Amino acid sequence: MEVNIHEAKTQLSRLLRRVAEGEEITISRAGVPVAKLVAVPRANRLRPLGAMEGQIYIADDFDAPLPDDLLALFYGEELRHKKPARVKSEKPAKKRARR
C-alpha cells in the first residue's frame, strides 16, 4: 500500500495496525516514495539455559576482594604512594580606587 505524507500523519495509528498484521506501507511525497513502514520482528524472549556453555569463562576468583589501590580509585581517594599535587594559591589583585 502507498500513502502520501498527509495521510500517514493523520492515520498513523491505523497504518501501524496494518503494519503489525504484516503489511508493508510506503510513504510518498508528491508521488515519490520516501519511506517504508515495516514490522519489527519480535525478539524471542525465552532464552534456553546453558546456551553459551563452553563459550564463556568465569575465573574462580572473579568475586575476590579488590586490591586497596583499586578500591581507592573507586572511592575517589588518592593513592598512598603518590604525592598530592601542589596547587599554587593565587592572590587576588588589589583593586585601585578610582578618583
Image (tube, rainbow, N blue to C red):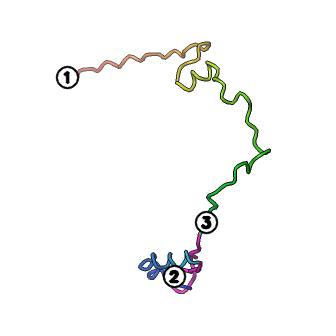
Q: Residue furthest front?
A: 49
Residue corresponding to mark 2: 29
The stretch of residues the image draws in magenta is: 22-39
| Mark 2 closeness class: few <14, some 14–19, many ≥20 residues within 10 Å | few
Q: Secondary structure at mark 2?
A: strand
**The N terminus: image quadrant:** bottom right
Residue at screen point 53% across, 82% down: 28
User: Could you say which is closer to the camera, residue 58 or residue 95?
Assistant: 58
User: Could you say which is closer to the camera, residue 40 or residue 97?
Assistant: 40
Image coordinates of residue 33 in percent, x first then y, are: 57, 81
Q: Is residue 8 positioned above or below 41 on the image? A: below
Residue corresponding to mark 3: 42
Residue at screen point 35% across, 19% down: 92
Residue 83 lies in quadrant: top right
* Residue 99, label in figure: 1
Instruction: Say whether marks 2 and 1 touch (CB < 8 Å).
Output: no
Image coordinates of residue 78 in percent, x first then y, are: 55, 18
| Mark 3 closeness class: few <14, some 14–19, many ≥20 residues within 10 Å | few
Secondary structure mostly seen in the magenta stretch: strand
User: Could you say which is closer to the camera, residue 10 or residue 51?
Assistant: 51
- Amino acid carrying mark 2 in the image: Arg
